[in-house]
Amino acid sequence: MAIPRILVVDDDPEVRQMMTQFLRQNGTIALPAATEAEMRQHLSGGRVDLILLDVMLGDENGLEICKHLRREQDVPVIIVSALSADHQRMEGYEVGADDYIAKPFNPGLLLARVKAVLSRARRSSSLVHRRKTQRFRFCGWTYDAKRDEVMSPAGIQVVLSRRETALLQTLVANPHIPLTRAEIAAALDVTGDAAPENDATGRAIDVLVGRLRSKIEKNPKVPQILKTERGVGYVFATDVMPEDA
Amino acid sequence: MAIPRILVVDDDPEVRQMMTQFLRQNGTIALPAATEAEMRQHLSGGRVDLILLDVMLGDENGLEICKHLRREQDVPVIIVSALSADHQRMEGYEVGADDYIAKPFNPGLLLARVKAVLSRARRSSSLVHRRKTQRFRFCGWTYDAKRDEVMSPAGIQVVLSRRETALLQTLVANPHIPLTRAEIAAALDVTGDAAPENDATGRAIDVLVGRLRSKIEKNPKVPQILKTERGVGYVFATDVMPEDA
DNA sequence: GCACCCCGTTACACGTTGTTACAAATCCCT
DNA sequence: AGGGATTTGTAACAACGTGTAACGGGGTGC
C-alpha cells in the first residue's frame, strides 16, 4: 500500500513545522503549505490523500477554501481550528469538511482521526475506477507509484523490494528537501535498535539507501539522484515531473 | 437520493426517544434499537445508511460491536459516548468508527456530523451498492459470486474449490485493504493449529493464497492481483468493478 | 473398498532486511 | 598540510518471512 500523502495547510510556521514533523514520524508523507496557492500547487503536482486545513489563513478564509475544494475534487479535508464553539464546528461541517479538530489538539487523537478518514477514503475509493495512474519521471527514469515499479532510462524494468520502494516514495515525495534518518525511518516504520543510544535506527537507512542507489543510480559511487547531506541525512536531488497516464 | 435511514442504538429509553424524535424532525428516518440483536434485525431487514452507536450498551460492548460491523459491512458508524477522554475517543476511531461524539451533545452539531457522514457516504456509494451484486470484474477476469465461478480474460472457465472461493470473496470484498492472516483465517473459519504459539493458523493461508494465485494470476511468480504485504498479510491490489446482473 | 479431490501440515529454498565490522571519505583543529 | 575524530559506504552475515513441492488424512461418489 502506498504511503499516505497529507497536505498540511497552516500559515503559522511553528504549527506547520510541528504538525509536519509529527506526521512524518508516524509513517506519512507530510507536505507543508502556508497559503492556498501553495496548497493548490501540491494538489496539481501529485497525489494528495488528505488535507489538514487551518481555517485562519491570514486574510484567506479556510472555510471558503474548503467549500471550493469540495466542489472541485474529492479529497478528504479535516479542518483544524482554534475556534471550537459548536456553531463554528457546524460551519465547518457545512462547507463539507470530513472532520473538525479544535486547537490545541492531542497529537494522538489527531493521528487517530487522520487514520480514520484515510481508511474510509481507501474503503470507498477502492471500487471507483482510479482516475490517473500516478507516474513520476526524473533523470530519464520512470516511477510508477501505483504498481511500485521503476523503469530505467533504457527501458529496462527494475524491481525494487518493499523497503526500497517505500524509501523511493518517501524521497520522491519531498524532492530537494533533506530528510533525516529519523524521519525516513519513521516514514518506513523501521524499528532498528542496533545502537539504541547513539542512533535510534542504527545503520539500516544507510544500507537501504546504498541498495537503492545500486539499483537506480548509473554510477552508485557518484550519486546523482539520492545525494547525501552530510551530518543531516539524504536528499532526492532531482526535479520530478508528475506524469498523467 | 432517498430519505436517509438512521439506526439509533442506545439502551437508555429516554436518550433513544430523544434522538429518534430529533432526527425525525430533521428529515430522516430514525430506527430505534436497544440491543445489538435489535440492531442486527434492522440491518438485515432493510437499507440502513448510518448507525449512531452508544458504547455503553448494558453488558454489551459498543466498541466490540463496531469492530465486528466494520468487518462485515460498509455502513458508516458514529459512536456516541459519555466517555470523552482523548484515549477513549482514540479507541473509538481504532475500531473503525467514522466519528465520535461525546454525550451530552449539541443536537445541531450531531445533525451536522450526521449530514457530513451521509454526504460522504453518498459521494462514494453510488457505485457501492454491491449488496446484491453478484458479479465482479477485475483485470479482465469475471468473478461470479453466485455460481462460484471465475472466468479468465480469455473466456476460459476456471473452477475454484470451496476454500479458494471463500478466500477470493474475502479479498474482493476488501480491495486495496491489507488483511492479516488472522483476519483471513477468521473470515474463512480456518482452525489451523500447526504452530499454536507462533502462528495461530500455521501456513494454511499462505498455501491457500498460493493455490489461488496459480489459478487466477497470469504469472503466479509476479502476482498482480493478490499481492503480499510483507510482515502483514495479503491485499487484493486491483480495482474491482461490480457488475449488476 | 477404491479412486479422486480438497486442504492442512511440513520442510526446504530463496529473497529480504537489520546488524556488524571495517574501509573510505570528510571534517575540523592546530 | 597533517592527524585524529566523525561520518558514510558497503560487504558479509544472520534472522526472518514467504513461496511452494510433497505428503497424508479425511471426505465424497461410485
Image (tube, coloured by chain):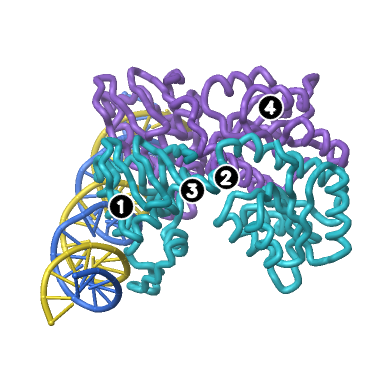
Chain colours: A purple, B cyan, C yellow, D blue
* Residue marked by disc 4: A70
Q: Are marks 4 and 3 on the same chain?
A: no
Q: Secondary structure at mark 1?
A: helix
Q: Which residue is mark 3?
A: B174
Q: Mark 2: which secondary structure?
A: helix
Circle 1 residue? B212
Cα distance, mark 4 to mark 3?
26 Å
Which residue is at a point 87% across and 52% down the rendered structure image? B21
Query: Subunit of mark 1?
Result: B
Three-letter amino acid code at the position of disc 4:
Arg
Name the kind of residue labelled 2 in the image: Ser
| Residue A159 appearing in the image | yes
Q: Is residue A207 visible?
A: no
Above or below, A227 against B4 in this view is above
Q: Position of residue A131 (x, y in %)?
A: 49, 26
Callout 4–callout 3 Cβ contact below 8 Å: no
Q: Earlier in the sequence, mark 2 or mark 4?
A: 4
The dot on residue B153 is none
